[in-house]
Image (tube, helix red, strand yellow):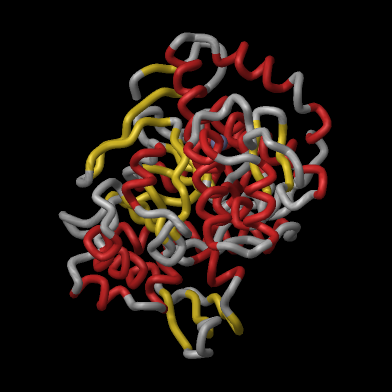
Amino acid sequence: MIKKDGYSRARLGRIDTDHGSFSTPAFLPVGTQGSIKSLIPEELVHLGVEAILGNTYHLYLRPGHETIERLGGLHTFIHWEKPILTDSGGYQVFSLAKLRKISEEGATFQSHLDGSRHLLTPERVVEIQRALGSDIAMVLDECIPYPSSYEYVKTSTSLTTRWARRSLKNKRENDPALFAIVQGGMYRDLREDCAQRLVEMNFEGYAIGGLSVGEPKSLRREILEWTTPWLPENAPRYLMGVGTPEDILDGVMLGIDFFDCVLPTRNARNGMLFTTTGKISIKQAQYGDDGRPIDEHCSCYTCQHYSRAYLRHLYLANEILSSRLNTLHNLHFYMEWLRRIREAIREDRLLDFYKTYSSHRKEGEAERSAPCQA
Ligand SMILES: [Zn+2]
């Protein structure tokens, strides 16, 4: 950690990995299938992306971690030389797979691609991420649906904690850094208990999981308020699958270091574009003759060269370039948002930044969180 904010729990830092370091607070774009859809790595670097996320579940099923390992590991395979975080696949088993069954041993499921049966155990998940050669690996956890009863969450969180211990036991010396995942649903004592047990095991970093599953934003803030004080100051903290620019700012204020979410890239492909004055849907008829860029304050490639009218035309004509130009803009917007947050922490004015921003966004307050993972 480089600096702590004096007025909130925000932290400025750098996370070191075998493939270089990245500045925090950070946003990691999601490369579900080993690609950030429609962009090449050089474009990501140009946008200021310093680390990306790969989905273990997808890469394990197709093309397979052993194939990727034989071809030199994920960095070589996808031509990305900077840090890669891989998730454990737990969320995708929960959200995509068919006929899943959770037992003490692990998660049995049927592939959503071909119906083949698989068993992911905590040990196997560490092995798969070792084969991929990722820089930061996540332990297997059970993703808890919302809402769930106290008894269910207690039993599930206890299993996730036992799985974390097994993951750590299977870790070898040159393995990726291993992060634990704090679960506990929406219950304060279960969150606190889970965090304490995981911290006792001494992981290299801690994620907060099981959020952005449909809970109200105010509840998510409370959970972060309860949980982050239990996490060690000197270890990175990762909020999984969150979120919108405002969710990220909230998370930073509550002590989170980095985030991932499919939102900027998925929204781009759906014609939803982020601007400094809110989101716009480029397909709307009002942009048909609009010669202005998406955002007059944006310095991205798309805004430097193209009008809303052209972007609307590309979208309606279903042109591949539509996805590319929209993704370039949305990721630029996210990277710029994080850069401004880091700058505000560095200059001791994060609270002012937050107040200025909050005064513009009261209307979104009651919104429920939307699932944000691949
Ligand atoms: Zn732009």
Q: Quadrant of residue 174 in the image?
A: bottom left
At a point 67% along the width and 42% down the height, the residue shown is: 308
Quarter location, residue 170: bottom left
Query: Taking the image as drawn, is residue 262 in sight?
Result: yes
- Residue 45, image x, y percentages: 34, 42
> In this orientation, which residue lies closer to the viewer: 295 or 113?
295
Q: Quadrant of the N terminus?
A: top left
Classify residue 245 as left or right of residue 41.
right
The quarter of the picture where the C terminus appears is bottom right
Q: Taking the image as four quarters, which one is ligand 1 found in? A: top right
Residue 183, image x and y in percent? 56, 52
Instruction: State whether residue 353 is above or below residue 202.
Output: above
The image shows residue 50, relative to residue 297, as above or below, that is below
Question: With 352 as the anchor, is 300 left or right in this view?
Answer: left
Q: Which residue is drawn at 52% across and 38% down?
A: 305
Q: Is residue 18 left or right of residue 321?
A: left
* Residue 170 visible in the picture: no
**152 or 218, which lies in front?**
218
Residue displayed at 63% across by 31% down: 295
Percent from the top left, x then y, of residue 342?
45, 22
Whole-percent x, y for residue 85 in the image? 36, 52
- Count the marks: 0
> Vertically, is 348 above or below 157?
above
Please, is residue 223 above or below residue 110 in the view?
above
Question: Residue at 43% of width from left, 47% of height from top?
Answer: 198
